Image (cartoon, helix red, strand yellow):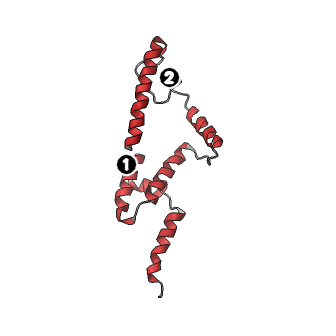
Amino acid sequence: MPKWYMEELALYEEEWHREKDFLGDQWEDGDRQFVFHNGKGKPYYYQHSTKWWKRFCERHSIRYIKFHGLCHSSGTLLLEDEDESNFDAILMAIQRRLGHARLSTTTDIYVHVTKKVKKRTAGKFDKFARK
């Protein structure tokens, strides 16, 4: 994960411990450390995150994409800005980030060709144009 993200997560962990200490006996889930919880240590109901995300998208006029769709988007965006000299390495990095055992799962299902990539690929034929 990026350094800035890990720093934010560390700050959040400190806040989590303060919250747990403040609640004392009212903390409901022992030493389990859920990143997202109900305020007393218990994990949210499994549909909570999805509902929250949908409302967030509506509130901010963002096109709604299911949570799982964000995996596809992240893989595609990571690949989109890479140049071809680094293609194999970035595909393997994306594979690891998404947690796939096989590279073919990443390339066949999760990484999609965008308009930007199509234009860049089509532009490679410019060198064959008559002068």
Q: Is residue 101 visible?
A: no
Rendered position, 78 above or below 3:
below
Q: Residue at x 52, y 22 (%)?
A: 39
Rendered position, 79 above or below 20:
below
Q: Who comes first in sequence, dot 2 or dot 1? A: 2
Q: Residue at x 64, y 46 (%)?
A: 61
| Amino acid of disc 2 | Lys
Numbered circles on residues, count: 2
Q: Residue at x 39, y 56 (%)?
A: 91
Label 2 environment density (alpha carbons within 10 Å; few <14, some 14–19, many ≥20): some
Label 1 environment density (alpha carbons within 10 Å; few <14, some 14–19, many ≥20): some
Q: Residue at x 37, y 48 (%)?
A: 96
For the residue pair 46 and 81, the one nearer the viewer reads as 81
Q: Quadrant of the N terminus?
A: top left
> Picture coordinates of residue 26 (x, y %)?
49, 13
Residue marked by disc 1: 96
Label 1: element kind: helix
Residue marked by disc 2: 42
Label 2: element kind: loop
Q: Quadrant of residue 104?
A: bottom left
Please give the label number shown on residue 48: none
For the residue pair 94 and 56, the one nearer the viewer reads as 56
> Picture coordinates of residue 121 (x, y %)?
47, 70
> Picture coordinates of residue 10 (x, y %)?
39, 32
Q: Is residue 48 visible?
A: yes
